[in-house]
Amino acid sequence: MRGARIALRSALPFLVGLPVLWLLDVSLPVGYAIILMSAGVNVIMAVSLNVVNGFTGQFSIGHAGFMAVGAYTATKITMAVHGAQLFGLSPAASSQLAFPFALAAGMATAAIAGVVVGLPSLRLRGDYLAIVTLGFNEIIRVVIENTPFLGQATGISGLPRLTSVVWVGMGALFTVAMARRLGASTHGRALLAIREDEVAAEAMGVDTVSYKVRAFVIASAFAGLAGGLLVHLIQLCTPRSFTFIKSFEAVVMVVLGGMGSVTGSIVSALLLTFALEGLREAQQYRMVGYSILLIVLMLTRPTGIFGTREIWDLLPRRFRTRGPPPGSPLAGAGGGGGSA
Amino acid sequence: MTALAETAPVLEARKVTVRFGGLKALADFDLVVRPRELVGMIGPNGAGKTTAFNAVTGVYPPTAGDVILNGERVNGRRPHQICILGIARTFQNIRLFKELTALDNVRVACHHGRRAGFAAAFLLTPGFTRDEARITRRAEEHLALMGLSHRRDALARNLPYGEQRRLEIARALATGPKLLCLDEPAAGMNASEKVALMELIRKIRDELGLAVLVIEHDMRVVMGVSERLVVLDHGLTIARGTPEEVRRDPKVIEAYLGESYLEEKHIPIPAGGAQ
């Protein structure tokens, strides 16, 4: 009975989210669904980057590199299964069946890449991580462009559209719940302490190197998830989707929303996606727009929209519940259905 | 006192030397701190007091010599390991987690007692919930101990200066140390605040039964509260003993107190010493 209640509590955001997402999936016209899905992918990308840049105060600017690792892993698995009939199921059902495994494998390889990149660079204090992640992003791109197995610069096309509103929504819920529950736990506080003062955190018994690496690996894994979902949405896996521009987009979302604010990242990811969609004709000026946005933001509100706070911290005091206690189901449902 | 003197030391520094390039910031530093002892460390700016602290707490590994904590040699251990082994510290220039609440500042320090891992935090397991409740309770107790319960949910950066100092001590205590190292805890306070703080430190020592090592600039304050003093100057230990002995030591008078001390005046020492 007790066990069942706990299981229910930790799964609550997903149980609530699933029917809502399913309803959206069947009711939305395709055009809107695609925008919603790309917004959801961006939510996963921004919220996961926030764990490193916002919570831990490290500066990673190569998030797209990890997305690429996850995306190509998932793509290769999907393409291997494509057309096959697993357990006597139809090809379409087989692909759907293999999809979660492909995504999970993408997360795993992205996490491994996170260890490889993070372990040496996070031992050092300062801005080394920014330089290393930027380099990693470029290396990944160059490697892909020169590897026939990965389709080189043309990429791998002909992917089935496996990504649906339900998959993206559940992925976003998973990411948001991870970030919120991590943030409300003693592990999350250790990360925040590192952001605030690394020397003091270490003096208080926080193993700073290990925590920085763990945060980085978690963020990389979820970047891999975003990458996997993205390529199965646009049905094309190409290095052009994972250039520095993509990484920069993720950084802008985190900074705009507020470093360390999960709801901030969600809001800015949604805002930027919808804004870009509305300004489709002006796509080529996107980088200019981002740069101007960042400059204006840094001049007028350097902490981002929400600073380190969450959206409900800004509500009038009488509506405030003073933050959900760590054990409550709310702790995981913060901004639940962010993409829904 | 004799019974105490025979107990095994909490901390022992043997001929600890710290060199930065050609500069010997600390030379052949010896120190023994026994359980429940209150030891003061004084000396002018740049004397090596903070360096001694940093060598003991693992911030700078000693160039030579040994640091022994509860009978275990801890040279080269990282600060977080030394913290877990039982030394907690505060900082000369307050280093709180400014954007976190007072409660969270202290909860970070209760961190190493956790059992639940990342996955448990995600799954909200009963073990995790229990851990969190225990950590919160422990943090609240330490806030109460330092008289900060009313500031539980205030951001650390918004606290007045004196409360920030106390919060730093609460945070250090929450790590469950056997030895508490306070680096100029009374810096920036006036004379009566300093005395009140020293009384509080003595009370903590008595109630929690831990050893305390205090760096203090103000001779009179530290003399009133310490049982033993170590005097540093230019990285060298120039005197040690009871406050009375130190007070009369000609080397101490020359190096630190100056002539004016004899006239019961306090000469402000120019700030900006390389610490």
Image (spheres, coloured by chain):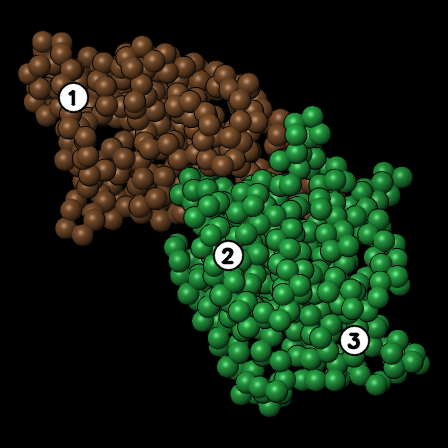
Chain colours: A green, B brown
Distance between mark 1 and mark 3 Cα atoms:
75 Å
Q: Quadrant of residue B226?
A: top left
- On the picture, is B218 further left or further right than A15? left
Residue type (three-letter) at the residue carrying disc 1? Pro
Residue type (three-letter) at the residue carrying disc 2? Leu
Residue at position x 88%, y 54% in the image: A19
Q: At numbered mark 1, what does the secondary structure look like: helix, strand or loop?
A: loop
Q: Are marks 1 and 3 on the same chain?
A: no
The residue indicated by pointer 1 is B268
Mark number displayed over residue A293: 2
Q: In the rendered view, tell whether residue A323 sits above or below residue B200.
A: below
In the image, which is nearer the foreground, mark 1 or mark 3?
A: 3
Report the quarter where the N terminus of chain A lies: top right
Residue at position x 12%, y 14% in the image: B261
The residue indicated by pointer 3 is A161
- Badge 3 sits on which subunit? A
Residue type (three-letter) at the residue carrying disc 3? Arg
Kindly tell me whether residue B109 is visible in this rendering.
no
- Badge 1 sits on which subunit? B
Task: Identify which residue, B212 or B8, lies in the foreground.
Answer: B212
Q: Position of residue A31 (x, y in %)?
A: 78, 68
